Amino acid sequence: MKSIAKFFLTQIFLLVFTVAAYGKGSHFVYCSEASPKIFNPQLATDGPTFNASSRAIYDRLVEFKKGSTEVVPGLAESWSVSKDGLKYNFKLKKGVWFQTTKYFTPKRPLNADDVIWSFNRMRLSSHPYHKVNQGTYEYFRSMGMGKLIKVIKKVSDYEVQFQLARRESPFLANMAMDFASILSKEYADQLTKTKKMASIDLKPVGTGPFVLDKYVKDTIIRYSAHPKYFRGEAKTKKLIFSITPDASVRFQKLKRGECHLIAEPSPIDIDLMKKNPKISVKEKPGLNVGYIAFNVEKKPLNNAKVRQAIRAALNRESYIKSIYKGYAQVAKNPIPPTIWSYNKNVKMTSYDVAKAKKLLNEAGYPKGFKISLWTLPVSRPYNPNGKKMGELIQEDLKKIGITVELKTYKWATYLEKASKGEHEMIQLGWSGDNGDPDNFLSVLLGCDAVKAGSNYARWCHKPFDKLVNQAKSLTSQSQREKLYKKAQLVFKEQTPWVPVAHATVFRALTNNVQGYEMSPFGTESFYEVSIKK
């Protein structure tokens, strides 16, 4: 046992040494906040997974222009839409090669078969890979994509047609999201023959700018530049993710030059970072919301008055001051004010202990009750310190007779258990993926999202769902906006969450980093990044 332990300690030491050594020349080190859930973005909804998989390893038919929400060509060189809005034809670029790895060498470039295989895996229960690695497909299912996509037709080796069951205004933007990444059918066929199908999501092969070399859970991810990348080889030849959950430790690593960029710097450290001549701080208003979700399938949270009482009892202004250090604003809606259709007329719920006690009494709980709250185990753009927020919530709810037990789990476990509805109250949040209100309202609060596992409130409210589904079927943005604003009023009345904050997003990097630009979606792309010598 001692020799085994010694071996693993030696390996970790070597990996840490490698991180320091790779901080030179054409190597780039990113201090990330958490391990990826898996290496296939079809099976995830979290930022650490997207950064480690879809942004590094894969591409999509269409992409978002760097730093914006504009949809531009990706693996598809062009696309066309029929007059009735039900048929989308994508013409693929030729000569796009999947990555060569230790376990796979492609014999052909990407073609229509790969696109069809990738989407049919998510949409067809009969697909041989549909249930591989549990096959949750939260995003795909929460947006009702299985019902929306009627047929995927191969027009030619380099053209694919998606036939929709109804009009869907956000469809093109949705196709640029991480879940829509394209995998290799040829690689999948090889794994089927060798009976190693689970490796499709663990030993990934994509068309993206970086090839996965090594992954040690909770420690490090190493990548090499894909030499045949269709946009040209990345300037960064070696990309390293140094997994560092503690924000203060990330800051120390940045100061020592052990990493070039850190994820989610703590608001406490922002002023110190700005004063450091070797560090640059970037910031922008976050397309995000941090919230406390109520599992409405569990008593007493199935009672709207209980939920409203908890909302009134939380002193969210104090959270903004002590946790976000003022770099956020109190939230009242489930979408941020930076997104169109935000309803300014929704009245903010003020902190009111007397009102909270009155609502609890009306709900039949004059003496309160006991309940658990899951606190975030990692810092996120929408909540930099889940543990501290949990403690403040605990104190606030104690004032109205509610005893709160705080619980947490490792990030991947936290998400997995929450998607199954094992929690009572839970801290979570969301950074928008495509700039459309539907990305918040359907994905997080729609009825399809309950089954998919991304609606952590487990709240299926038909009047709300009808408004949101009707809105995304319209082409007029002004008409859609009216319906989304009505939906936000229903949300306020029903209170499946307490929206807590819309946070300013920060990134801290060393001054020798070139080509880095913050994404409006909070994800990271390192293809154009380099180190100034």
Image (cartoon, grey):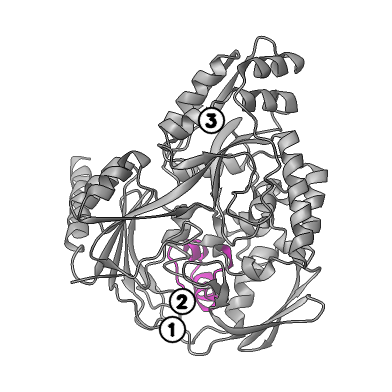
Residue drawn 20% across the image and 62% down it: 23
**Mark carried by residue 521:** none
- Rendered view: 493 above or below 527: above
Compared across the picture, whether 185 is left or right of 163 comes to: left
Q: State how far apart marks 3 and 1 are (Cα).
A: 48 Å
Q: Earlier in the sequence, mark 3 or mark 1?
A: 1
Q: Residues within 10 Å of mark 1 (few under 14, many from 20)?
A: some
**Mark carried by residue 230:** 1
User: Where in the figure is residue 428, as x and y percent of width and height?
Assistant: 54, 41
**Mark carried by residue 207:** 2
Per the image, label 2 sits on a secondary structure element best described as loop
| Residue 90 in which image quadrant | bottom right
Q: Nearer the viewer, mark 3 or mark 1?
A: 3
Say whether marks 2 and 3 touch (CB < 8 Å).
no
Q: Which residues are magenta?
A: 179-207
- Rendered view: 160 above or below 213: below
Viewer can see residue 136: no
Q: Residues within 10 Å of mark 3 (few under 14, many from 20)?
A: many
The kind of residue on which mark 2 rests is Thr
Per the image, label 1 sits on a secondary structure element best described as loop
Per the image, label 3 sits on a secondary structure element best described as helix
Say whether marks 1 and 2 touch (CB < 8 Å).
yes
Between 443 and 389, the one lying in front of the other is 389
Q: Earlier in the sequence, mark 1 or mark 2?
A: 2
Viewer can see residue 140: yes
Residue drawn 56% across the image and 57% down it: 43
Q: State how far apart marks 2 and 3 are (Cα).
A: 44 Å
Q: What residue is pinned by disc 3?
A: 316
Q: Earlier in the sequence, mark 2 or mark 3?
A: 2
